[in-house]
Amino acid sequence: MRYNVAKRTPTTLLDDFFNDDFYFPRTNYGSQIDVYQQNNKYVVEIDLPGFKREEIDIQFNNDVLTIKADHKEEEVNENKKYYYRSRKVSSFMRQIRFNGIDSGLIQAGFNEGVLKVELPIKEVNEVVNRIEIK
């Protein structure tokens, strides 16, 4: 199968500057995530630089942890003439499935741009039922 890839030619010097990987390296924003098990809980750590605590929404429903963050700058400054603006709106969403979580004990903290969610694993008390042979 053949793919046709068309390369866009920069139309101005500013386009050329802002599309240069040397000055503005391409990043996979919001993908810095660690998930690990520590003691009797899972821990999820996500880098969310530029977001405020009140812009982050965390939900746990049907064994799925959903983390959403939306940031919008409403600053209006008539004295500025923007040539390039990429910080006005940013959003992030990630969903991770977990099994055996005690959803009533989930805790989250946000410090210096890092969100940390702790998901306690349910304690399973296996009851051995002795079956009588007849």
Image: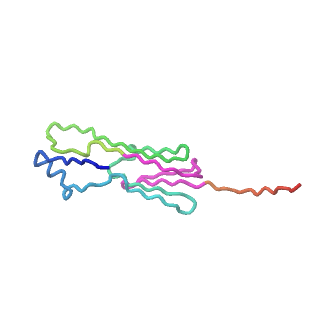
Q: Position of residue 4 (x, y in %)?
A: 25, 47
Q: How many marks?
A: 0
Magenta residues?
92-121
Q: Residue at x 11, y 46 (%)?
A: 12
Residue nearer the viewer, 85 or 106: 85
Residue 95 lies in magenta, yes or no? yes
Residue nearer the viewer, 32 or 113: 32
Q: How is the image coloured?
A: rainbow
Farthest-out residue, left? 13
Magenta segment's dominant SS is strand
Residue nearer the viewer, 112 or 15: 15
Farthest-out residue, right? 134
Q: Is residue 79 left or right of residue 108?
A: left
Residue 118 lies in magenta, yes or no? yes
Q: Is residue 133 left or right of residue 61?
A: right
Identify the image quadrant of the C terminus.
bottom right
Q: Position of residue 17 (x, y in %)?
A: 14, 52
Q: Position of residue 22 (x, y in %)?
A: 19, 59
Q: Position of residue 42 (x, y in %)?
A: 52, 57
Location of residue 80 by image quarter: top left
Residue nearer the viewer, 82 or 12: 12
Q: Residue at x 15, y 44 (%)?
A: 83
Q: Residue at x 51, y 50 (%)?
A: 97
Farthest-out residue, bottom? 39
Location of residue 71 by image quarter: top left
Q: Is residue 35 left or right of residue 40?
A: left
